[in-house]
Amino acid sequence: MLNRLNTLFCLFFCLITIHAKAQQAPVNPDEQIRLVVVLNVEQMRTDYINRYWNKFREDGFRKLINQGAVCANASMNLHVQKNVAGVPTLFTGVYPKRHGIVNESWYDRLKQKEIDALRDDYYITVGSDSKEGQISAKALLSPTIGDVLKLNTNGISKVFSVALNASSAVFSAGHAADGAYWMDSETGNMISSSYYVDLFPDWVRDFNNKKFAELYTDRNWETLLPESSYEESLEDGYVLEKGFYNRWNTFPYNVKKLKERAGSFKILKAVPFGNTLIKDFTVNLIEKEGLGQDQVPDLLTVSFSSMDYENGSFGPNSLEMQDVYLRLDQEIDNLLTYIDKNIGIENVLVVLTSACSSTYPVEYLKEEFNMPVGYISPESMVALLKSYLNISYGQDEWIEFVSEQQIYLNRELIEKKGLDLEEVQMKAASFINQFEGIKLAMPASDFEQGDYLKSQLAMISNSFNFKRSGDVLYILEDGWQPKYKYKRTIYNDHIRIPMIWYGDGISKKRILEEVEAVDMVPTIFEILGFDPPAHSHGRVITELF
């Protein structure tokens, strides 16, 4: 760990201006926050809390609202609205243009191949024999809050992350974390990568030996309350709900059968028991790793899933979604109660937020509300673009790679043919702009030269990375979604995210000023008494104080 810290220091010294030596927080040590807990509820819409308010318990979401500060106008302004891009944005305090995680993968023009944001075969899985731990945070170009906290305390602070998904665990943990854990879909075990853990902790092995994943999948998912009491949601089996595997869309759900159909434990990410697994593991981690037991602040990030890939199969108004949140409310209640009992809430700062929101299904918007929305086929659009470029410049392979909302042109071929890259980019963007459902397509050259931070293109500008972004970048009209022939994808265009602050020094208030996801990191450091990282794109949310 010491060698890793030294390497990190050398790497970041040239990139950011921070104090590498431990700083004395300008507060009374007896009043120092001992533990920061960031709860990232994946794909959580801001309206869920108000919608389900009457069904929540007193000590879950209600406690956070009634005793905390709510940033009611918080947003995640990204081009690709996914957890894989949102999590590093949230936990580094900078946008993808700087931290580099523009999507799940991108095209490396120098190596002429697709680069996975996480994949790193140099490291091995720790905790199972699968390949799901062969990943690292090396592609993340900026330090996370945990990395800077480690540097500010000479490595004394403990930093851990827990999630169902590897991307959430890794990109919230960063480079120097003491541990990042996520669920292995093949075995149901909580695992890590040798990038973080050299020797797998005995307590994690003991936790896995209890086979919680098998326990939670060997049961039915029934509604927590009588179905008749879910007035806030659509009726069970709503006609436009696709359901699991486009087949099952009514309670109760046989989770064991769904697991057998999936061939893995991945189904836990789409039912509420996955959140129970994460809560159970988090409680064990706090106890076994001794978090919050001294005057040096520790950091714990916990990512809960709200149906993951099946979000679009049911939708934000579904009875299933409400039940997921009513049960998550219980898990948050249990977690806060445990923290208060064992550490003292007066010694803890809790932030509940989301790295990504969710949107309504196209069919629902169109059939129920007559909205002018629809699907766009990226594959058909790119095929027509290829034909157009062939007609314009001659038959050849003009497109090298296509990612969500990004098209990578064959720059080597363009140079070989003596063509002007900017001209080809502009020609391709103009062609894409003609498709129904496209709000705007822009050439990369515009973002390389121009400043769009205060325009409607801010979300693309925030995400544009010179080395990793495509040559043509586009956004869809509101309510429109991509539909692929051979793959499923999570698409969101809802930028609003929840951000609730609770714990030591936080009083009840509602903040209406605009807040961005990148504001969380500098604000946490301000609360801890450290200088906010100089590299951060965000501001301190002074309205909290």
Image: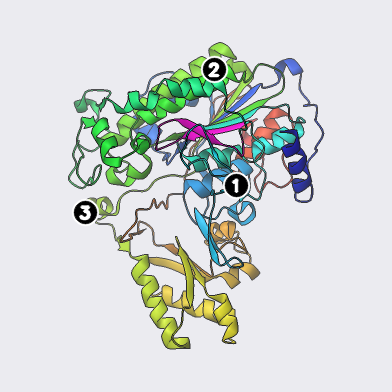
Label 1 or label 2, whichever comes before in sequence order: 1
Quarter of the image with the N terminus is: top right
Q: Amino acid at mark 3?
A: Glu
Q: Which residue is mark 3?
A: 367
Q: Residue at x 45, y 87 (%)?
A: 392
Judge from the rendering whether residue 373 lies leftward or rightward of residue 45; answer left or right.
Answer: left
Judge from the rendering whether residue 202 lies leftward or rightward of residue 326; answer left or right.
Answer: right
Label 3 or label 2, whichever comes before in sequence order: 2
Q: Amino acid at mark 2?
A: Ile
Mark 2 packing: few (<14 Cα in 10 Å), some, or many (20+)? many
Residue 37 locus on image (x, y percent): 57, 28
Q: Residue at x 28, y 26 (%)?
A: 218
Q: Are marks 1 and 3 in contact (CB under 8 Å)?
A: no
Q: Return the residue found at the far right.
A: 21
SS state under label 1: loop
Q: Residue at x 39, y 22 (%)?
A: 330
Label 1 or label 3, whichever comes before in sequence order: 1
Q: Which residue is mark 2?
A: 339
Q: Which residue is mark 1?
A: 122
SS state under label 2: helix
Residue 317 locus on image (x, y percent): 29, 40
Q: Quadrant of residue 220?
A: top left
Between tags 1 and 2, which lies in front?
1
Mark 3 packing: few (<14 Cα in 10 Å), some, or many (20+)? few
Between tags 3 and 2, which lies in front?
2
Alpha-carbon span between mark 1 and mark 3:
50 Å
Q: What range of the chain is rendered magenta?
A: 179-196
Q: Quadrant of residue 521?
A: top right
Q: What's the colour scheme?
A: rainbow
SS state under label 3: helix
Q: Are marks 3 and 2 in contact (CB under 8 Å)?
A: no
